[in-house]
Amino acid sequence: MRKFLIVNPFGIGDALFTTPVIRAIKDSQPNSVIGYWCNERVKDILKDNPNINKIFALSRGDLKKVYHKSIWQGIYKSINLVCKIKKERFDTLLDFSLDHRYSLIAKIIGIKKRIGFNYKNRGRFLTDKIDINGYSDKHVVEYYLDLLKPIGIKPKSYNLELVISQSCKRKSKDILAEYGISDKDLPRPCTQGRGLIIGIAPGAGASWGCDAHLKQWPAIRFGQLADRIINDFKAKIIILGDESEKPIADIIINSMHNKPIDLSGRTSLEELSAVINDLHILITNDGGPLHIAVALGKKTVSFFGPVGPKVYGPYPFDEKRHIVLKKNLECSPCYVNFHLLSCKRNRECLETIDIDSALNAVAKLL
């Protein structure tokens, strides 16, 4: 029985991009044990995955925040985390972090086989490494699956996976019921006579921090699009996002003639996933909610600007279920090999995507 430790300290999309890796391991070695070292923010989208045996939700970024508040508390949490991981006696590390410190810790605590990416010579503590300059010529999922080659595991499925607990599904239905959406409105699938429920996630891109706005289609246009969807398709519109994205939601709502359902700042990440699971379509920027919807088999319309959808878009791509809206400019994508180039064209790649294009995409998916 092999014991694997997966390390991925990044955001929602990156965590979901590792789920085909987890599935491949379990298909190949059903009795294997899988631990997952992630950040605190994404824990809720992993904790109900039956193929993950243990989660260690405390990344280097999380620890930096703890140290900032209290050095002693930071030292205590660091030692406690390492001791918990060491106690599990993992024998194989799959390191997606691009950071040499995770593989160094793995070496110190005795994990013999350490597989990962050698980006900028950060793979010096790995036993098996793949040299990369960044992610550019294929989807991140395919890069991630490459780490299985040194242990001879081939994937049977490339689909993202997300499991939602029954209690959270009930919570979603209770939330929607507050706004007059009953079971008969929920997709089974969408048919004539049933209510059409469309979600809009106008924020997204939390892992980009203060640069997240560079990935976002203008909020005013989301509002105009929502009004036209309500008028043309008699749909119910749900605005989604976390507390930090409430100002964006307020702009949308205040610009609309019709009244949407505002759930921004009202749901946890797990509850957000459950609500997305009850949608017919999600309209969103490039970010975590997009990949949640893809993992749940939902139809999506997504806006891509500085980031290339070939690398970070819906995966596996199915044109009958996912429509990506983007402008093919000579300068795009400008996020290349983990670096964002300065924009000299005032976000033309997003600003020139018109409302008619988005409305036509929704109509096509219906």
Image (tube, grey):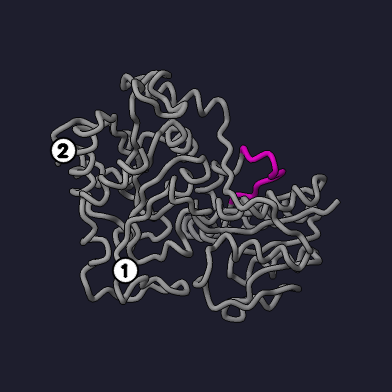
Q: Which residue is mark 1?
A: 328
Residue 320: x and y, percent? 44, 46
Report the amino acid beneath label 2.
Answer: Met
Residue 281: x and y, percent? 38, 39
98 and 191: which one is in front? 191
317 and 65: which one is in front? 317
Q: Is residue 353 left or right of residue 152?
A: left
Residue 321: x and y, percent? 44, 45
Q: Residue furthest right?
A: 1
Q: Residues within 10 Å of mark 2 (few under 14, many from 20)?
A: some
In the displayed structure, 335 sits above or below 92; it is below
- Marks 2 and 1, how far apart at CA: 30 Å
Q: Is residue 292 left or right of residue 103?
A: left
Q: Residue at x 46, y 40 (%)?
A: 298
Span highlighted in magenta in the image: 48-57
Residue 94: x and y, percent? 69, 62
Task: Examine the structure image and report whether residue 102 is included in the region drawn in magenta.
Answer: no
Image-quadrant location for residue 31: top right
Task: Give the SS element for disc 2.
Answer: loop
* Res. 270 in view: yes
The disc label shown at residue 256, or none: 2
